[in-house]
Amino acid sequence: MEHIVSDIILYGDMPEDSILMELSDICRQLRAHSQTRDVLAMRVFRQVKRLLVTATEYGFDKNLWHNYLTFLIITDENPFSITCEKTGARDGSVNEFARNDFRAFRALFHYDFSWLEKELGTDCFSRLSDYRAISKPELMYNKNVSEKVQALSEKLGKARDETEFFKLVTDFYRTYGVGMFGLNRAFRISSEASANRVIFYPINNMDKVMLEDLIGYEIQKKKLVDNTRAFVEGRRANNVLLFGDSGTGKSTSVKAIVNEFYDQGLRMIEIYKHQFKDLSRIISQIKNRNYRFIIYMDDLSFEEFETEYKFLKAVIEGGVETKPENILIYATSNRRHIIKEVWSDRDDVKINNGMHQSDTMEEKLSLVHRFGVTISFSKPGQKEYFHIVSGLARRAGLSISGEELRREAERWELAHGGVSGRTAQQFINYLSGQR
């Protein structure tokens, strides 16, 4: 194995403590008799455990060794894989390096561990080749990743040569992309000041809500869909501000829009106010990727003493560098003007040709004006509230008369914050739990 791994070029920049590198070193040490069998057996068992942990995390099944190698290939962001993501495999010298690596990976796919098992008195790798997970498919932590990895893994295991292996992998890159952006739909960030970059962390348990799950607000949803569809199709689109009363479905609509357009290359990065200073770094790291990114800011608002909004203003519009075409900003807020206004804002009012102007007010309102689309979500009236409740009750399969449902819904909203889509959902959750 150590000779096969040493031949990998483009995909060879793996940490020394990775499973593949550790197993390679174990094989080398065993052949050289430089460590005792007991020590090497213990090291093997540690790597087997890591394979099992990975399988549990991603819901892998059947041949865990093949799944692991496939996961390495489709998450390795190197010049070849990123180019394939954007343009597909093209003629060039780099292809020969890639074919060399895929020849090595194909050899790893069919590596015979029997000599290692015989030397160390174990059959753990034989067991990993036909692993049956205890958890049911619906309990997988990240089913989306699991399905993609296992489907490609099975095809790669049957590839007749490195040419077929090459085509399978590059087709996957072109269809889904490479790395975490290819496998996941939503991310959070943390900054790494020492490297002047941000680290993206997948949100594995993102709500699976779709737009059809949000009852009512048809005009608002259509505006959001029209803008997003234009964006993913490469046409001109605007940044979007969804504002209005709490519990009306603003955040749910954004999550749903990402789920709706995920297969067309839409991804979401959620950031918070204290991370606005990292906006430029986020954009620099994603602007050349073959995806459309929504930078999402939930419950956006600023008190008068907070100045982070200035970072946002510069990025949206007004900075020296043009915002890339593959990035939009979607934000939700309970405030129409986002930044809190006070009466003292009017202290610098000037009269010009009969118009009252205030520099402070203009400064605060200028952020809102940089969102090309603003969508208002107001609390539903009583009639619309019962429409939402009725729709959610039908979806939940509740057997209850319309009159009783209305009576109980009225009682619930009086005691739980008034009429809203959120209140309606909480009421249905309560009813479902009582039956």
Image: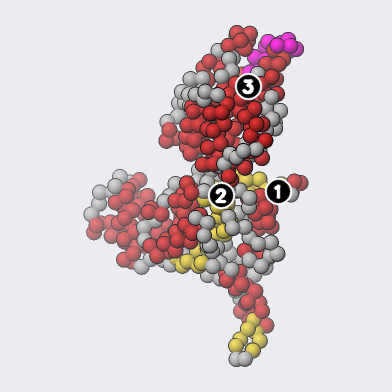
Q: How is the image coloured?
A: secondary structure
Q: Quadrant of residue 199?
A: top right
Alpha-carbon span between mark 3 and mark 2: 37 Å
CA neighbours of label 3 inside 10 A, class few (<14), some (14 to 19), many (20+)? some
**Residue corresponding to mark 3:** 46
The magenta-colored residue range is 31-44
Alpha-carbon span between mark 2 and mark 1: 19 Å
Dot 2: element: loop
**Is residue 137 depicted above or below 246 in this figure?**
above
Dot 3 or dot 2, earlier in sequence = 3
Q: Amino acid at mark 1?
A: Arg
Residue 335 appearing in the image: no
**Residue corresponding to mark 1:** 197
x and y, in percent, of residue 7 in the image: 69, 24
Please identify the dominant SS of the magenta region: helix
Nearer to me, 339 or 382? 339
Q: How many marks?
A: 3
User: Which quadrant, please, contains the C terminus?
Assistant: top left
- Give me the residue at 64% from left, 27% from top: 100
Q: Residue furthest bottom?
A: 354
Nearer to me, 239 or 274? 239
Dot 3: element: helix
CA neighbours of label 2 inside 10 A, class few (<14), some (14 to 19), many (20+)? many
**Residue corresponding to mark 2:** 291
Question: Which of label 2 and label 1 is nearer to you?
Answer: 2
**Is residue 190 depicted above or below 221 in this figure?**
above
**Is residue 151 depicted above or below 191 in this figure?**
above
Q: Is residue 32 magenta?
A: yes
